[in-house]
Amino acid sequence: MKIIALGGAGDMGSRAVRDLAEQPDLEVLVIGDYNETAARALAREIDDERVSALKVDANNHEALVAAIEPFDVAASAVGPFYRFECTCAAAAIEAGRHYVSLCDDYDAAQAVLQLDAQATERGVTVLTGLGWTPGISNVLARKAAEQLDEVRAIRVAWGSSASDSEGFAVILHTLHIFCGTVPSWQDGKLIDVPAGSDKQRVLFPEPLGECNVFHLGHPEPVTLPLTYPGATTVTLKGGLSEDMLNSLAKLMATLRLSNTHGKRVAVAKLLKVLLPVIGRIGRPAHPCSGIRVDVEGTKDGEPITITYGATDNMDRLTGLPLAIGAAMLARGEITERGVVAPEACIPPDAFIAELAKRDVTVYEGDLLDTPLSLEA
């Protein structure tokens, strides 16, 4: 398999690159990044003749198409996705190559879905949002839904320590999702709710434990109802375990300091410097990130709720799914064409088994303390 990892030198992309470099059937892996110095340093660190680096500017459409064309799959970690998802996906479609991304911005997901007809016509799969959330969350939702006769509600929650990742794109994303109104699927329709509203205390697998979460802007309420239209509720809530930073993000939104990309960039530059200091306030003993998915429905006429979750470091929860998805596409294990989300094309058991090979454990039950057994 021949893969180009766009943004592959970044915090999340580099984890995917390292994982792909370990695959025995890999033929060629190019780390395509605007930061050529970092890309070449990563290639030297991996020290594998199959792995090389290339400067790629996602703002140059013709060059991006040319960079993608020699490969089977383009795997994108180029953020923020509200700026670059459609750009990279459109280039892959023009190049006639499959594409998978970490896209975690709701507006980017809504926009890239509009490219479905073009991708289908070209016989290309654009798999948007295969990381931690969305990604693992969507696959776990499908895993639960497949055990039910009827799906009524899907509730996704994520929690994270800010010190688990201090990457610039992550800061931009956090400012974006706390801003304005965000989509939520309620009463069978997509509505806008205030970002940062409806605070809830949620339990995640250890060592994350309990964390406050809020309505935030992620793609799950946009894509999951397309696969499960009978569900009356699909919500996404998230939050940082350092509660002061949740309040700070909401304050910046209220003061309109994060309502444009330019403002977010300015604030993110400041936060990039300050986070190592202010992040110590309320910092957990073991910084990590977690996902929880509760799917409500019926089985044999009886109401039932199935709960899954996972906890690990953010780069692993995010980067490893990207690598798994890229490999699945390159190997022909995903056959759906057009623009699709993970729940529409990823076989849950096969995906969870791949996570297990990489020591990412999925837990089940409302206390999230029992490892999932695929044989059960």
Image (cartoon, rainbow, N blue to C red):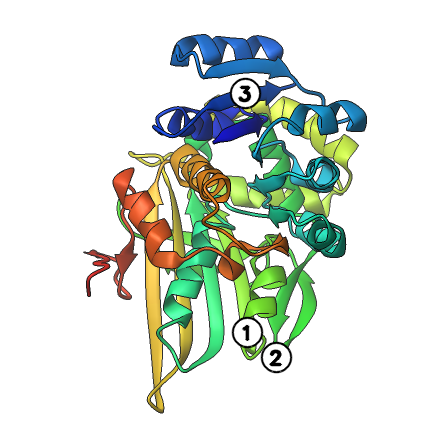
Q: Position of residue 372 (x, y in %)?
A: 24, 58
Q: Which mark is residue 187?
A: 2
Point out the frontmost of discs 3 and 1.
3
Residues under labels 3 and 1: Cα distance? Answer: 41 Å
Mark 3 and 2 residues: CB-CB less than 8 Å, in contact? no
Q: Which residue lies under the disc numbered 1?
A: 233
Q: Nearer the viewer, residue 244 or 162?
A: 162
Q: Earlier in the sequence, mark 3 or mark 1?
A: 3
The one of 353 and 184 positioned closer to us in this rendering = 353
**Residue at the image position 63 percent from the left and 61 percent from the top:** 222
| 252 displayed left or right of 333 | right
Identify the amino acid type marked 2: Asp
Tell me which residue sits at (74%, 51%) in the image.
115
Residue 137 at what x, y percent from top left?
45, 55
**Residue 30 bears which disc, if any?**
3
Q: Amino acid at mark 1?
A: Thr
Q: Amino acid at mark 3?
A: Val
In contact (CB < 8 Å): disc 1 and disc 2: yes
The correct choice, above or below, for 300 with respect to 167 in the image is: below
Q: Element under label 3?
A: strand
Picture coordinates of residue 289 (x, y %)? Answer: 39, 42
x 40%, y 59%: residue = 140
The Cα atoms of the two marked residues, 1 and 2, are separated by: 6 Å
Whichever of callouts 1 and 2 sits on the residue coming sooner in the sequence is 2
